[in-house]
Amino acid sequence: MVSHKPVKLDDQVYCYIWQGMGNNCNTCVFVNVLKGDRPHVIIDPGHIRNETGEECFKSLERAMASDNIKTEDIGLIINTHTHPDHCEANERIVEQSKAGITLSREEDEFRKTVDVNLYKLFGIKAPQFTPLFHLQEGALDLGKDGFQVQVILTPGHSPGSVCLYLPEKKILITGDVIFFMSIGRTDFPGGDMLQLKNSIDKLSGLDVEYIVPGHNTEPNGIIRGKDRVKRNFEAIQMFF
């Protein structure tokens, strides 16, 4: 049984909403946006296998296959941050496709130092990789037909978390910064509530019609509609 729900937001933006019993993140794919024979970009591929034994990555591969997306056709992995439920499957993709990996410089340093202890806490081997490049705040040109994504540095849940914004499509991918009526936790190493508040304030000014959070706190997973997005920001800003 597929534990990811495929959701197509746009011809170039596919989402795979985690529906399993245990912990795992939602995943997005930018389809046919890179030049060459590996044209897809995946954001946060998640766990290989979670704490309940669910085969998360196999489930993701089945869901992507329903949209004719193959792992071997992925050319780039973007990590919003490096907690294991978002990036454990990096290495599995690289094995199959030789994809490059990118994340913020701040998150890369965190991954190699403090974040190692979090992997030990969960009994998971810390991912071993060398980034192809580091994300910087601003426009990221992915190289084909002018496809660009805005990278927004949003520390708080972790020191180098990023969100990805597609202004023309009005889609915001938030990692674990915000959810539906909830915020990312800050009690893990590297978390900072004041930084998280500032990051959320920065995001709240964007023109957004779809929020794709890193985890579900409502059945449908995606926050749709400008009014609902606005109300969601207003509600979570009351936490601070």
Image: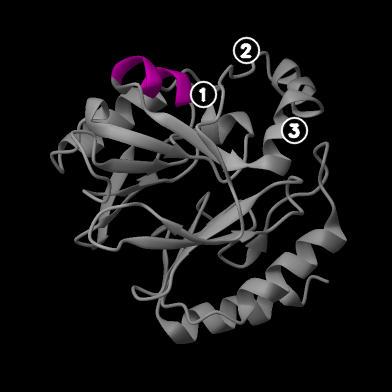
Taking depth in this image into account, of 109 and 157 the one nearest to the observer is 109
Question: Which is more toward the observer, 119 or 109?
Answer: 109
Q: Are marks 1 and 3 in contact (CB under 8 Å)?
A: no
- Looking at the rendered structure, the secondary structure element under dot 1 is loop
CB atoms of marks 3 and 2 within 8 Å: no
| Residue 79 visible (yes or no) | yes
Q: Position of residue 98 (x, y in %)?
A: 35, 21
In the visual, does 3 lie left or right of 235? left
Element type at mark 2: loop
Q: Which mark is residue 115?
A: none
Q: CA distance from mark 1 to mark 3?
A: 25 Å
Quarter-wise, where is residue 66 in the image? top left
Q: Amino acid at mark 2?
A: Lys
Image location (x, y in percent) of residue 54 = 43, 22
Tag of residue 125: 2
Compute the Cα span from label 2 to label 1: 13 Å
Q: Is residue 102 magenta?
A: no
Q: Which of the marked residues, 1 or 3, is nearer the chain's N terminus?
A: 1
192 relative position to 142: left or right = right
Q: Which mark is residue 109?
A: 3
Residue sitting at 62 percent across and 72 percent down?
203
Work out whether residue 3 or residue 105 is closer to the camera in this orientation and state it: 105
Q: Nearer the viewer, residue 174 or 22?
A: 174
Give the quarter of the figure containing the N terminus. top left
Nearer the viewer's eye, disc 1 or disc 3? 3
Q: Looking at the picture, how far across and down is residue 38, in whole percent?
A: 23, 34
Residue 2 visible in rendering: no
The three-letter amino acid code for the residue at tag 3 is: Glu
What is the magenta range? 89-96
Q: Residue placed at 69% from the left, 69% from the top?
A: 200
Upstream in the sequence, badge 2 or badge 1?
Answer: 1
Q: Which mark is residue 50?
A: 1
